[in-house]
Image: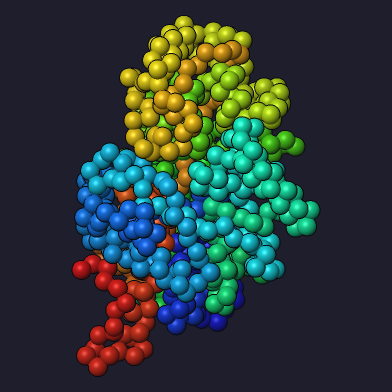
Amino acid sequence: MTSDSPVDLIVVGSGAAGLACAITAKTRGLDVVVLEKEPVFGGTTALSGGVLWIPLTQHGRKQNPADSAQAVRTYMMQETGSFYDEAAVRAFIDNGPKMVAFFENETAMKFIPTLYPDYHPDVPGGVDIGRSILAEPFDIRSLGKDMARLKPPLKTITFIGMMFNSSNADLKHFFRVTKSLISFLYVARRLANHLKELALYRRAVQVTSGNALAARLAKSALDLGIPILTSTPASQIVMEGEQAVGVVAGGEGGGRTIRARHGVVLACGGFPHDTLRIAQAYPHLRRGHEHLSPTPTSNTGDGARMAEAVGGVVDIRFREAAAWMPVTKVDLGKGESGVFPHLLDRYKPGVIGVLGSGKRFTNESNSYHDVGAAMIEACQDLPETAMWLVCDKTTLGKYGLGYVKPAPMPIGRFVRNGYLIEGKTLAELARACGIDAQALERTVHDYNEHAEHGQDPAFQRGSTSFNRYLADADHKPNPCVAPVMTGPFYAVKLLMGDLGTFDGLTTSVAGEVLRRDHTPIAGLYAVGNDRASIMGGNYPGAGITHGPNMTFGWLTAHHIADRAAAISAPAANGQATRMYEATA
């Protein structure tokens, strides 16, 4: 085993939280290195929508001047319930806008506003606009030779490798391509530019969403001279007495020790692929049901495991231990498969979700997490945790279904490979799916009776601004509701997946990893999904992972830098000047 030269700070993981922490620490004068397990950087961030829920930024205040810290605090109190942490919430509200301003003013990071409502805008403190921002699209050619090291987006959510912006305005053009000349020209231009990129670079270079967020942060880190060591997994925290002083890292040439003067920050992406831990944490897995996660398969809980080995604590506290996402398994051909997250189709008019019983069970236009939680609850006594999305020929042609694209894209191969189930009648579709045929016919009849008038008395689809945001604004009177009438009929089978774990290491507000007795392990910190979510297992709005993760990554870096300054050059009164106040 060899030993590298010591640095001030080691950050393990190259997602948004880890890079935010590394960049901030570097600007505070610390010598930082980032270790990444995979041969590419970006982590789960690079696969995500790239949205951040950060209330009261300059972008949000322009959209919603009436928003306030008290409204945000009220909303979070409602959403987090018994897990509400006043000190952490106050630190997040106070410092989130400062974090955004720092990254926009000092780095290559740029954000744009979105039109996203909170996911529960009708809850006290919820709003219809102004709290979610998005990474601005980015040309990754500015990464130079490191462009090849950026993790590509999920294949299942691209079209021939072309990425879609998480902005609903961008996506609407693709749904309207056959109906609007403006949309047709927009899509044609996007496709032409993308095909040119493929010819020249064999990948998209104009990236959006989470790929843009990861790329901009990586560019910022590399510009500051922060090494991002890919293919370098950390396996062990090195302790001297009660203090973390480095890690044992793998990579070319075998294991080596990298020492850190001021700390180790764990940002390993949580534990969505730690099979033993999720078997305990996920209720549907405890029943023996299936789970498919589109998160990186390298997110195997390394941070949690390393911290536990030196006294850290990971308890399964939250009822919802992960951000649930209903998904389908996609045959990509040549023996390759992928996981498709159902981010859009459930909101569209004419799409309903049923269980094997043939009955609806929830408002399909609620957030993916809410639909996932309802699905887990509804299937607790069933043989599997699964639902079927059902629509008719007209709806399939307008919006697609799952991985199946709208007309004029062909559907034959999806019918042949079994991804898309087809039936001339509802009864035929039900038999092909293994659904109770009589119950499905009754469900659709009862639904259609009201859907023809844009109503859904059973589950109130379209009753909130969030329901309507990802639906079809051109469909009247209810953008979420249309009948299922014209055969043939179609269905896809959804299983449970996740976008990352919510439970994680117990930390202080500043990110110090705590022992069971709540004393900090000196020199050891956790950020991102390695740290238990401030949201307490709920999902209040678009970007509630990246927003808090980057904010607390920024806070943790300042905490470490303040401690380093106090050690090396204490002020005359014995106190270092603090850059923030996390626990006041």
Q: Quadrant of residue 187?
A: top right
Quarter of the picture holding the C terminus: bottom left
- For this rendering, which residue is in front, 88 or 63? 63
Find residue 382 and report its horizontal and vertical position in percent. 42, 21
Residue at horizontal 62 percent and vertical 48 percent from the top: 163
Count of numbered circles on the image: 0
Residue 280 is left or right of residue 489, and the answer is left
Residue 184 is left or right of residue 97, and the answer is right
Quarter of the picture holding the N terminus: bottom right
**Residue 342, placed above or below residue 201:** above
View extreme (right): residue: 199
Find residue 201 and report its horizontal and vertical position in percent. 75, 58
**Residue 411, placed above or below residue 94:** above
Find residue 337 and report its horizontal and vertical position in percent. 65, 37
Residue at horizontal 24 percent and vertical 58 percent from the top: 69
- For this rendering, which residue is in front, 403 or 528? 403
Q: Quadrant of residue 444?
A: top left
**Residue 559, placed above or below residue 400:** below
Residue at horizontal 26 percent and vertical 40 percent from the top: 123
Residue at horizontal 64 percent and vertical 56 percent from the top: 206
Report if residue 311 is visible in the image: no
